[in-house]
Amino acid sequence: MKTKQILKIITDVFMTAALLLLMAYSLIGEAVHEWLGISIFLLFVLHHILNIKWCRNLFRGNYPPIRVFGTVLTLLVLLSMAGSMISGILLSRYVFRLDVHSFSAALRTVHMLSAYWGFVFLSLHLGLHWGRIMGMARKLTKKPSKFRKWTLRSMAVMISAYGAYAFVKRDFGNYMLLQYHFVFFDFEESVARFLMDYAAIMGLFVCAGYYFAAMLIQKGKKY
């Protein structure tokens, strides 16, 4: 495996871990949250530097359904990340310490919407590229295995099922639709339990992105 490819994988792994921790906000502390926000911004910039070829080819070639989906999804990720970063900087109390009390309510709304929608968009984006990840994993194994294939599929189903349950239990959809203006945390809950639920929600959307992308690829072959 090439060094650049390894660096891409490491960057994406750290971005995923940082994203999950960022959702824990009050459970990990506001100062840690802000520093993690800066970290994921730097990782996001590095991710795009490593994938600069995609940006250069944005206006080249044909646009089959799968490419349209991927491009729209990437733009939505960029929009949500921009909303999270700008509102986060303006709301900062520990790193940047900006005084924007007059706009804090509106900024918190933007930050929450960007965070929850961005979580979904990034998870779908990961699902879009999951086939490539699985392809690299297959190269590391000596021969195909039906047992391994069905074990992984069973795990995906179980994670998705629990992710759907956690999505409802955690009121994730209500935050996305702005039914609540503040995120409620149970401070007696362990961070590990919180992260497990959010990792399952991420898994749900990763699976959704993966299978939707597979459907679009098949549709594109008909044209």
Image: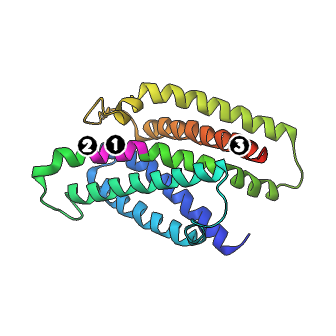
What residue appears at the point 54 percent right and 64 percent down from the top-left corner?
A: 11
Closer to the eye: label 2 or 3: 3
What residue appears at the point 55 percent right and 68 percent down from the top-left corner?
A: 55
- Residue 158 lies in quadrant: top right
Q: Which residue is mark 3?
A: 214
What residue appears at the point 25 percent right and 35 percent down from the top-left corner?
A: 181
Characterize the local packing of mark 2: few (<14), some (14-19) or many (20 or more) Cα atoms within 10 angstroms: some
Highlighted magenta segment, given as a residue range: 109-117
- x and y percent of residue 124 in the render? 55, 45
Seen in the image, is 107 located left or right of residue 137? left
Q: Secondary structure at mark 2?
A: helix
Closer to the eye: label 3 or 1: 3
- x and y percent of residue 123 in the render? 53, 46
Say the numbered circle drawn on residue 72.
none
Characterize the local packing of mark 1: few (<14), some (14-19) or many (20 or more) Cα atoms within 10 angstroms: many
Above or below, comparing residue 204 to residue 43 in the picture: above
Say the numbered circle drawn on residue 109.
2
